[in-house]
Amino acid sequence: MALELASAFQVRPAEGDRPGAFASFPYDRDLVRRFRDAFPRARWREEEHCWFVPGTTALRRLDTWMTRELETLDRHADERGRDAFAFEPLESPYLAVGDELVVRTPYSRTVVEAMRRIPWARWDPQGKVWRVPFRSYGELRARWQEIEEAARRNEPAARRARAESREEREAALALQAERRRHRYPVPGDDLPPLDRPVATLAWGIVVFEDIGPEPLSDLRLRDRYPHLKDPLGRYVFARWRRPTLQEVYRARPAREPDDADLRADRGWWLPDRGELREAARRLRQAERAAAVRSSLR
């Protein structure tokens, strides 16, 4: 506002034989009255839309008068800004109020660009804050939602949460990719049986079809298979598939459940009756869902 006000006050020397200067400024009844009191010989020039002040010292006198008026108008603008703030205040942890408005936020390019568009706002490098005179309160309020939202997005806790969320999404995608490979690490010295339902820590009940000969060496597999322990070369990959419902029905449950530590160590075990019953229930649900989808095509 103040920048626009200053640019609206213009003084230029008159051209021609008659000495004098032209002045233009925004219309205000009190401002015009003060101008006429200061320059009683001034005349309005309709064709130029400005005032003409005669005299060889007119240019200097007009500059002095306009500088004084601008200072006065700035004081009035600050008072109006204070009144506007008192009537409709901004309440935010990022805003402090004193002789002027103080904005303190985490670093954000959005905040910097918004503050730079506010007239008279200035960066205080020592306090690491933005200082805004009350005359610019209207401009600050108009941009405050953008500033506050950007500040909240850049709080350390919010940035950590986004990073963790991103890491979780990446981990989930990596796990999905691993599932599509239909492989599972098992101890080479304690292999699961083939061609029968076997319970696993990662993929539930599966049927192993064959065992690979190569020992594992990719350390990243530890993030996807918690049962892997050193040395990693103790383990090999076993290829698996989902069991059919008939295979689960025919499977013989384990006579005695394996010890929990043994399950955690080798990552597989023979399922008990309850685990087979739950696997059968899920397979029946999957078959019914597939039948419904097929009927709708």
Image: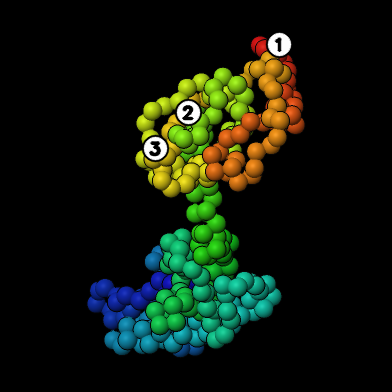
The quarter of the picture where the C terminus appears is top right
Residue 206 visible to an observer of this rendering:
yes
* SS of the residue under disc 2: strand
Q: Residue at x 51, y 59 (%)?
A: 159
| 138, 215: nearer the viewer | 215
CA–CA distance in space, label 1 to label 3 = 45 Å
> Between disc 1 and disc 3, whose residue precedes?
3
Going by the numbered disc 1, the residue's amino acid type is: Ser
Going by the numbered disc 2, the residue's amino acid type is: Ala
Cβ atoms under marks 2 and 3 closer than 8 Å:
no
Q: Residue at x 42, y 79 (%)?
A: 124
CA–CA distance in space, label 2 to label 3 = 11 Å
Marks 2, 1: nearer the viewer: 2
- In the rendered image, residue 112, in percent from the top left (x then y), is placed at 43, 65
The label number, if any, that marks residue 262 in the structure image: none
- In the rendered image, residue 24, in percent from the top left (x then y), is placed at 42, 73
Query: Residue farthest to the left?
Result: 17
Relative vertical location of residue 112 with respect to residue 200 in this rendering, above or below: below
CA–CA distance in space, label 2 to label 1 = 36 Å
- In the rendered image, residue 118, in percent from the top left (x then y), is placed at 47, 68
Horizontal side of 29 relative to 67 (left or right) equals right
Going by the numbered disc 3, the residue's amino acid type is: Leu
On the image, numbered disc 2 is attached to which residue?
Answer: 238
Residue 151 visible to an observer of this rendering:
no
On the image, numbered disc 1 is attached to which residue?
Answer: 295
| 141, 160: nearer the viewer | 160
Q: Residue at x 61, y 34 (%)?
A: 269
On the image, numbered disc 3 is attached to which residue?
Answer: 216
Relative vertical location of residue 193 with respect to residue 124 in this rendering, above or below: above
* Crowd around label 3: few <14 · some 14–19 · many ≥20 (10 Å): some
Marks 1, 3: nearer the viewer: 3
* Crowd around label 1: few <14 · some 14–19 · many ≥20 (10 Å): few
